[in-house]
Amino acid sequence: MNGDTAGATMRIGARNPFVYAEHVLKEKIKWNRLGPGQKRKKLEKAFGMPYNQLFDPLKGSPLFVKIVQANVNTGDLRPCITVSNPTWALNPAGSNYTVATRAHTDLVQGDLPDCFFIAALSSVAFSAPALIPDKPSTPYSYTFYNPPAVEGGTPVADKPISVSNLLPLDPAGKYHYSKSFTAGEIWPAMYEKAFASWKGSRTDKPDYSIICQGDPVLALMNLTGWRFTTYKPGTDPVTSTASRYSTQNFSDGTKIYNKINSVCQYTGPYRTTSKPMVAYTYDPRIERPPSGITYSDATIVGNHSYSVLGVHSVGAENYIVMRNPWGQKGAGPGSGDPDPSQLPAGAVAAGAWYQIANLADANDAIFALKASVFRDYFKGFGWVYQ
């Protein structure tokens, strides 16, 4: 079983099937008006495969791109497909940069498998919104940060990157990549474009395939200029001052809950993260999850990144609160949004949590996962600090 190490290269990335399906089917789908069964049928129609196979990288799903790690031969030849020969123009759905409250719930990942970046950006909007510019000047200017020479050092601010608000549209004039739930708002799209430009040749027409996969903790550093340190086995993870861990560094879920809780603060009666934090799952094509763990639902997806928003307790049970950057979660069996298939009973909490009326709502992307289940399904988690 692979843990996280300081020198490891993370390539996390899964496309948003809800946005991707709209482009495949060429229709605008109001997902929040569909029941779980209707959602499943739409996704199965779009991708031509059973719903419970769509979220597992082992099943040949189009949500995942080919493995690019050396010496890995899986026969997986799926490229990171981007919009070919795009027209660069204003987004017909709107070109307003306004960030309103810099809401972490604004962000919706698109066709691109860059969940590592969108989850990180949502976490920054949640825990450190002042770092997100209110309204950059035109052309829009962004500063990203390079890692320090030695992990734990101060990241290095790069030369600001400037981009226009022209976005890549397909031949039908549709925009495929990340967007905001707030109508007409493009700040997530602009951040994504600027990041692609910064990672590539610093052009106003960047190659988005450059950001198809990546490391969500490193993305937090790139966005904030804050640092992280990776836990080194051999010391007690419970007392460690590191900020990045493999879930398997901990003997049980309670210890993971306590570690995440140590980076939380009271916001009203709830415990929310005080620093931007992310978590990410296994890619079973290249690493072995704990015995019996498979990915079969949109709540917990293989090779996928999530924002960590805080912790929650219900009686004696402890939960980790997360947000899926897809803006949706689950289309579980039955009606409503019960526990996703193949998860233990009671794995997902219901009820109110900070600004959330009901954690069981399938349409807000936010859910609370029992800490013991988190340990099994998630590969690692981490945060950045000043």
Image (cartoon, grey):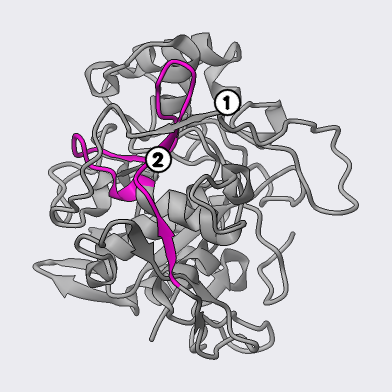
Majority SS type along the magenta span: loop
**Could you say where residue 330 lies in the image, as x and y percent from the top left?**
39, 31
| Residue 164 coordinates in the image, percent (x, y) | 37, 49
Between 148 and 143, the one lying in front of the other is 143
Residue 132 or 166: which is nearer the viewer? Answer: 166
In this rendering, would 36 be left or right of 195?
A: left
Quadrant of the rendered structure where residue 185 is? top left
Label for residue 340?
A: none
| Secondary structure at numbered mark 1 | loop
**Percent x, y for residue 379?**
59, 58
Find the magenta span and give its range: 160-189
Q: Tell me, yes or no, whether the highlighted magenta stretch contains residue 143.
A: no
Say if 42 sits above or below 113 in the image: above
Give the residue type at disc 1.
Leu
Question: Residue 110, relative to residue 30: is it above or below?
Answer: below
* Residue 84 pos. (x, y %): 60, 27
Residue 373 horizontal side relative to residue 262, left or right: right
Magenta segment: does it hold 181? Answer: yes
The residue positioned 33% from the left and 38% from the top of the image is: 327
The disc placed on residue 178 is: 2
- Dot 1 and dot 2 residues touching (CB under 8 Å): no
Q: Which mark is residue 54?
A: 1
Amino acid of disc 2: Ser
Of the 4 image quadrants, the one containing the N terminus is: bottom right
Point out the frontmost of discs 1 and 2.
2
Mark 2 packing: few (<14 Cα in 10 Å), some, or many (20+)? many
The residue positioned farthest toward the left in the image shown: 268
Q: Is residue 96 above or below residue 174?
A: below
